[in-house]
Image: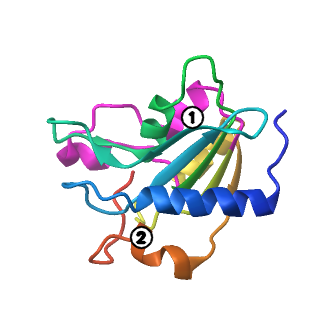
Amino acid sequence: MVERLDPKYVGELMRRCIKLSQIYVLGVSGPYVGSIYLDENQKIIGEGHKKIIDGTGLVLHAERDAFNNIKIGNIPKTLVTTLEPCVNFNLKKRKREIFDPCSELIVNEGIKQVYIQRVDRNPRVRTQGIEYLRRNGVYVEVLGWPSFEVKDVINNVNNEPSTHA
């Protein structure tokens, strides 16, 4: 079992995730998301943010971008992310998603724990990613803090419900 993270360290990691989420990428609409993977020793092994795959117009979620940035030989055990991982792409066909939902990636890759800044605000999918992870044996902690630091970063510009689902 992976040891739970120290709350102070989680705070440091979440601040880094927020900075990652602020990396502006032309064509990406909100919510802006940053993610970090840790190994079993709680060392950062992968970082990423929501982006467009070069020349395709396809959205790559932060969780998958961070996973893709893990060097060969490193095994992720923990994810820290600013937004609840997606679980259902049926709502996003207009965005031409080509990957499985991030929650499936997390389960399939053996991630043992996930720290989330906030749940998805979209009422059609809210908490479904969290529930999927928990049903599959992943420890999930929703931090829900500090809204003053992240409200303009994570929420899209028009303050509409997220479609990260």
Relative vertical location of residue 112 with respect to residue 152 in this rendering, above or below: above
Coloration of the structure image: rainbow
Range covered by the magenta-colored residues: 84-113
Q: Amino acid at mark 1?
A: Ile
Q: Which label belongs to residue 106?
A: 1
Tag 1, which secondary structure?
helix
Relative vertical location of residue 90 with respect to residue 18 in this rendering, above or below: above
**Visible in this render: residue 117?**
no
Q: Earlier in the sequence, mark 2 or mark 1?
A: 1
The residue beneath circle 2 is 153
- Residue shown at 40% from the left, 65% from the top: 122
Tag 2, which secondary structure?
helix
Residue 149 appears left or right of 139: left
- Residue shown at 69% from the left, 63% from the top: 11
- As for residue 86 lying within the magenta part, the answer is yes
- As for residue 109 lying within the magenta part, the answer is yes
Give the tally of numbered discs: 2
